[in-house]
Image (spheres, rainbow, N blue to C red):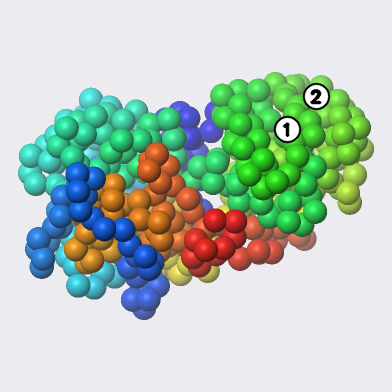
Amino acid sequence: MLSAFRRARKSLAQLVLNRRLALPALFLSAFALAGCVSGTGPSAGPVPGKGEPVQVALLVPGGSGQATDAAMATQLENAARLAMADLSGVTIDLRVYQTGGSPANAQAMAIRAMDEGAKIILGPVFAQEANAAGVAAAGRGISVLAFSNNTDIAGGNVYVLGPTFANTAHRLAGYAVRQGKNRIMIVHDMNTAGEVGKAAIQRGVAAAGGTVVAVAGYEFSQSGVASAAPSIVGTAKGAGASALFLTADTAGALPLLSQTLIDNGLDRQSTKFLGLTRWDIPAATLALPGVQGGWFALPDPNLNAQFRSRYQSAYGETPLPIAGLAYDGIAAIGALAKSGKGLGAAGLTQNAGFVGVTGIFRLRGDGSNERGLAIAEIRNNQVFVIDPAPRSFAGAGF
């Protein structure tokens, strides 16, 4: 199951927003894009005093005894502090709290942070912990910007910063339909993540004006993929599918599925593979014959490259993809504080959004997010951007 739906440390640390600082102030301006919403009324949230430091609680998964959690906690704090250094005209008072990998601890740390004066909570990482922190903060009017991408916990005072299936499906389906790939067959894992991914693709294709011509599932196993492949290919041909939208990821069925479909006679000249997940992580995936010519979505590669370079220079290691979310969270908080807006729903969900290391993004009233993604194609074992990430929410299907 994908990281969005389970506390899967490895996949979340490696997958959440694909990766990449003395960048000029313009790069991350933690400035909101134009068109801010007024921050008055009950949804305004805490309004930082003019010139006063904004106290932000960063909840990280340290203290669990897991090395991966400890590494993630360090990188989230590092990225948040890099974002703080880029802010102009606003000061962040960052307080770091370790959740120990437990919802109960996350709730206790959220309460402690608010007792100590936190105006907003950034984190935690995992869905159950984020939900617990959100429950604790709701009664005090404090917003929680979680690093999770599980939209089941989103809503009320909880916002998820992680990449969502819905966002990717909307962007990629829109591009595919504009390129004439409008007869789409969905091929999904028969597990929870696959079912959720299937639903996201169905909505994305409908919104783009395309047609879902067929849906096929396979058991999430090697034998399941092998036995289902001939039927999937036959259905695709019979339905006249111009694209197959796959929910499989690189750590799961994708390597076997992509090749097995081709081996069973799928015509790649007339039928394009579309990926709901990142196909460039790990990099070894790019050498797979089955993914050549496939399309997938990813955050703004240029901004990510700048972030990766600066982080590497500052800390001597490559940042995990999830680290960029901590930067983005501080960027949004700094933008609102500088403009004098509250840290509640009115400011956080401003239509124009914010700019971060992953490109433009905005939070929605339902607690989910939209991110400006690029579309890439794999050719000759390399990634080529074929449709750049938008720089505002006025285009690219938004």
* Disc 1 secondary structure class: strand
Q: Which mark is residue 101?
A: none
Left or right: 335 as drawn, with respect to 264? left
Q: Residue at x 65, y 35 (%)?
A: 202
What secondary structure is found at the residue carrying circle 2? helix
- Frontmost of labels 2 and 1 is 1
Q: Position of residue 311 (x, y in %)?
A: 38, 64
Residue drawn at x 7%, y 39% as measured from the top left: 115
Give how far across and how far down residue 383 sits, in percent.
67, 61
> Which residue lies under the disc numbered 2?
228
In this figure, which residue is indicated by the disc labeled 1? 187
Task: Report whether 76 appears left or right of 150.
Answer: left
- Where, quadrant-wise, is the C terminus in this rendering? bottom right
- Which one is in front, 124 or 196? 196
Q: Amino acid at mark 2?
A: Ala
Q: Which residue does the image show at 79% across and 34% down from the upper left?
A: 213
Q: Is residue 334 left or right of residue 188?
A: left
Residue 381, percent across and down? 73, 58
Front residue of this view, candidates 246 and 288? 246
The answer to whether 216 is drawn above or below residue 324 in the figure is: above
* Residue drawn 22% across the image and 39% down it: 98
Q: On screen, 61 above or below 320? A: above
Tell me if residue 67 can be seen. Answer: no
Q: Residues within 10 Å of mark 1 (few under 14, many from 20)?
A: many
